[in-house]
Image: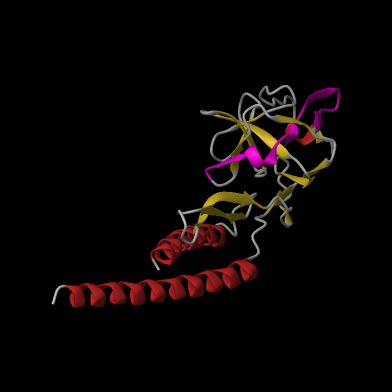
Amino acid sequence: MENTFYSTITRQSGLLQEMQVIANNIANMSTRGFRQQGVVFSEFVRKTGDGPSLSMAIANTNSTAFAGGELTQTNNPFDFAIEGVGFFLVETEQGVRLTRAGSFQPTAQGELLSPEGFRLLDVAESPVRISGDVSEIFVAPDGTISNARQPLTKIGLVVPTNTEALQREDGVLFNAGQAFEPTEDATLRRGFLEGSNVDPILQIARMIEVQRGYEMGQKFLDREDARIRDAMKSFTR
C-alpha cells in the first residue's frame, strides 16, 4: 500500500497544479492575446526489487493552445490583430519577446509602444518608427507600413521554430530566444484586437473534473492515514 500512497500524493500534487493553471486561464479570459494553458502529465515507473513496481504521475509540463482568439474591431489605427500563425516582436528589458497582444500607441519619436511600454519591432528587430501625418499612414496585410510617399518599415511577424521550447512570461509574452523566423502565413488586420482563446465553458467543466478527482484522492489519503494510525496503536498496546 505504500506505493499506492506515494502515487496518490504525486497525483494530488499534479491535480493541484492543473487547478492553478485552469484558474489562471479563467482569470485571463478577457486578456487580449492571452493563450490558454494546459497541463501534461507523465508517468514515472521504477522497478522495486522483486515486489511491484513504483508508479508516480508527475505534472511537469505546461502546454499552450495557439488557436486564434476572436477579433474585435476597435478602429484604433494602431491596434493590430494577427490572423493565422504568427507573433509580434516586442522589445522588453529582458530582451526580444513574442506576443499576440497588438495594442500600440505612437510616441513623439514615432515609435509604437504597447501599454506596458514595450517597443514594437520590425523584421530586422529594430523599433518600428513612423513619420508624417498619422492619418496618412497605411498598413498592408503583410505588415508593411507606408505613408503617402513611400514604404517606411515592416512589422515583424514571426513564428517560433520550436513551439515546445517556447517559454511563457507575464501572461501574453513568450520567450523563444532567437529561435524564430519570419512567417508568410500571417495576415495583419488593422483596427482590430485579438481576444483570449480561452473557452470558459470547457475550462469550468475541466475544473469540476479536477476538483472531483482531487477530492477522491484526498478521501483515499485520509482512509490510509487512519489505517496506519490504527495499525500503530495495535502494535504499541
Number of disc labels: 0
Residues 144 and 35: in front is 35
Task: Using the rendered view, name the quadrant where residue 180 is placed.
Answer: top right
Please say if 203 is above or below 105: below
Q: Position of residue 76 (x, y in %)?
A: 70, 46
Q: Residue 112, image x and y in percent?
A: 65, 32
In percent of the image, x 70 and y 51: which residue is there? 194
Residue 28 drawn at (x, y percent) = 56, 57
Residue occupying the point 67% across, 54% down: 195
Q: Nearer the viewer, residue 14 or 80?
A: 14
Asked if the magenta segment contains residue 140, the reply would be no
Residue at 68% from the left image edge and 24% from the top image edge: 125
Residue 164 within the magenta-colored segment of the rendering = yes
Q: Residue at x 63, y 71 (%)?
A: 201
- Magenta residues span 144-170
* Picture quadrant where residue 133 is located: top right
Q: In this view of the protein, can residue 34 be seen by the observer?
A: no
Q: Quadrant of the N terminus?
A: bottom left
Task: Report the front residue among 14 and 43.
Answer: 43
Left or right of 110, for residue 115: left
